[in-house]
Amino acid sequence: MNVIFASDHNAEPQDWIVPLQRELPDVRIVNWDDNGPAVDAQLAVVWNPPETLFMRETRLKGVFNLGAGVDALLRLPGLRADLPIVRLEDAGMGVQMAEYVAHALLRASRGFEQYQTLQQQREWAPLPDIQRAQWPVGVMGTGLMGARVAQTLAALEYPVAGWSRRGKDMPGVQRFASPAELPAFLARTRVLVNTLPLTPETRGILCRDTLQQLLPDAYIINVGRGEHLVEDDLLGMMASGHIKGATLDVFAQEPLPSDHPFWAHPGITVTPHVAAASLRDETISQIAAKIRGFLKGEALTGMVSRDLGY
Ligand code: NAP
Ligand code: GLV
């Protein structure tokens, strides 16, 4: 059986194919070459594959996504509606996401940027003690990423709430569910963390209408997808002072164009889509286990709902 590997990760394809092949000795793993002959594969292991793959490989029985988000994959016009898609579940991403968000929150709430400036001025000037009650955090999406973030920040004793479609009960985290509870969730939130998947329902959810419902001096941490955020609305609300700062890992256009206003904005921190990477060893062992299960006809977790888009 042939399995296509098609990934635009930074690494050399062979760095992934060799260990994946070792885990799956009974299949033949072929690196996808858009200009080469069709492979007649039954399975594909992908990250941001070219759309031609699904137009040319018409006998695929399953696709395994080397990341959590499937928005780019689901956009490909050649992707058959009946093709099962299995996505990566955590595999070491949740803890990275928690670190990233905790870092952004602590930098703001503990005044680390101000201390950096004070150091440059050789000034010994303690800032007022932290009042956690002044830093209520709201996490949008309480799936594998959001739940880990919310629980980590709750363990640091910040007031934390989580909002999602169905809602999730977690110790120390206030639960909000469904569009009906979004206004109440926003109204108690100062630091808004977005870990939602990009779907038709969530595209543009971080817009003027939602951002203006946050508490004053708000902060935005976007680690979901760039298209969740209406960029001009964020810039406008930072100019008006309602939003004080933003830490952004994902952008509508990636790489972020060199003339984009986010680069030089004093209140915005930009990182190049690195909040939570697909770690090679964890990813390969999880995807290999999912492929073995799929071939045995077992029920798998991480099946993507084509109706919901995640
Ligand atoms: P997940 O486990 O599927 O969780 C998705 C969460 O979003 C669930 O809680 C879901 O609600 C909620 N949700 C989906 N649609 C919603 C809607 N319309 N309204 C309210 N809540 C909604 O996904 P995950 O593994 O946590 O990953 C989430 C996203 O993080 C990915 O899709 C990707 O875009 C992003 N990500 C980014 C990076 C990075 O490096 N920046 C790395 C990994 C992932 P229910 O619980 O009710 O289903
Ligand atoms: C990364 O952005 C992912 O979705 O895994």
Image (spheres, rainbow, N blue to C red):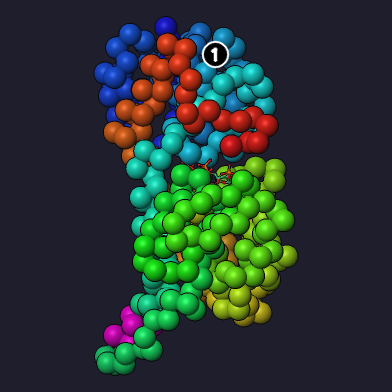
Residue 91 against residue 97 in the figure, above or below: above
Residue visible at 49% across and 79% down in the picture: 134
Q: Amino acid at mark 1?
A: Leu
Q: Is mark 1 within 8 Å of ligand 2?
A: no
Label 1 element class? loop
Can the viewer see residue 104 in this picture? Answer: yes
Q: How far across and how far down the image is residue 286, in percent?
A: 36, 29
Q: Residues within 10 Å of mark 1 (few under 14, many from 20)?
A: many
Q: Which residue is mark 1?
A: 60
- Most common secondary structure along the magenta stretch: helix
Q: Quadrant of residue 158?
A: bottom left
Locate the C terminus by quadrant.
top right
Question: Looking at the picture, how far across and down is residue 108, in whole percent?
Answer: 43, 74
Camera-side residue of 285 and 275: 285
Picture residue at 36% right of the left edge, 38% below the top: 91
Q: Quadrant of ligand 1?
A: top right
Query: Could you tell me which quadrant the N terminus lies in?
Result: top left
Q: Which residues are magenta?
A: 113-120
Left/right of residue 138 with respect to residue 280 in the rendered view: right
Q: Is residue 211 above or below residue 297?
A: below
How many discs appear?
1
For the question of whether residue 246 can be seen, the reply is: no
Residue for point 47% across, 28% down: 301
